């Protein structure tokens, strides 16, 4: 049974969202730089390489550039973050039982996102066209 509380009880999720937006703005504008250790060690892109630059391009309204830096972040990770925050607000307010699906549905969703990340990771590092254009450093 879900305990229904007031929307005023929602405090943690907005704080997490504000912290995430502040970190995103700092990363996207270049105020905060976090080099990719995987790229530094191997010369290959990880699934998140180019995510900061994609965010910076979005902050400037350039969706095409954001897609060229990291399409996975733009198409999968950013929407997933928004949906997860909305679900967390509903959970914190007592409007939902969970912020992530339970049981087999939750496992399949987790495996699906991890599988997409793995496919993106491999595809963007393939050394032949058209995959060479997926690199964050192309």
Image (spheres, rainbow, N blue to C red):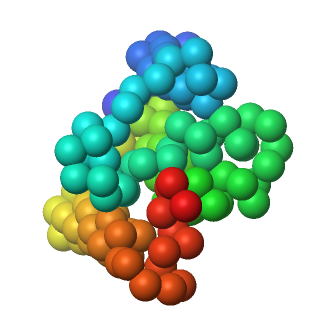
Q: Residue 16 appears in which quarter of the rendering?
A: top left
The answer to whether 102 appears left or right of 69 in the picture is left
Q: Residue furthest right?
A: 61
76 above or below 19? below
What x and y, as percent, mark residue 72? 49, 61
The answer to whether 12 appears left or right of 38 in the picture is right
20 above or below 138? above
Q: Quadrant of the C terminus?
A: bottom right
Which residue is more in the foreground, 120 or 82?
120
Q: Residue at x 38, y 78 (%)?
A: 127
The answer to whether 56 appears left or right of 61 in the picture is left
Res 35 visible: yes
Q: Residue furthest bottom?
A: 129
Q: Residue at x 61, y 30 (%)?
A: 28
Which residue is more in the foreground, 91 or 133?
133
Res 17 visible: no
What x and y, as percent, mark residue 81? 48, 44
The answer to whether 93 appears left or right of 38 in the picture is right
What x and y, as percent, mark residue 39? 31, 47
What x and y, as percent, mark residue 134? 51, 69
43 above or below 8? below
Q: Quadrant of the N terminus?
A: top left
Q: Residue 71 appears in which quarter of the rendering?
A: bottom right
116 above or below 19? below
All told, the count of numbered labels is 0
Q: Residue at x 50, y 86 (%)?
A: 129
């Amino acid at each position: 049974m879900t305990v229904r509380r007031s929307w005023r009880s929602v405090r943690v999720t907005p704080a997490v969202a504000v912290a995430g937006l502040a970190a995103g703005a700092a990363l996207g504008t270049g105020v905060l730089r976090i080099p990719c250790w995987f790229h530094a060690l191997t010369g290959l892109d990880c699934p998140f390489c180019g995510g900061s630059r994609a965010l910076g391009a979005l902050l400037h309204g350039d969706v095409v550039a954001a897609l060229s830096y990291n399409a996975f972040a733009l198409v999968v990770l950013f929407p997933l973050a928004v949906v997860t925050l909305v679900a967390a607000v509903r959970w914190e307010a007592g409007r939902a039982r969970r912020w992530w699906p339970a049981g087999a549905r939750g496992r399949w969703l987790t495996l699906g996102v991890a599988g997409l990340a793995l496919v993106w990771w491999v595809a963007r590092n393939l050394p032949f066209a058209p995959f060479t254009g997926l690199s964050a450093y192309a």
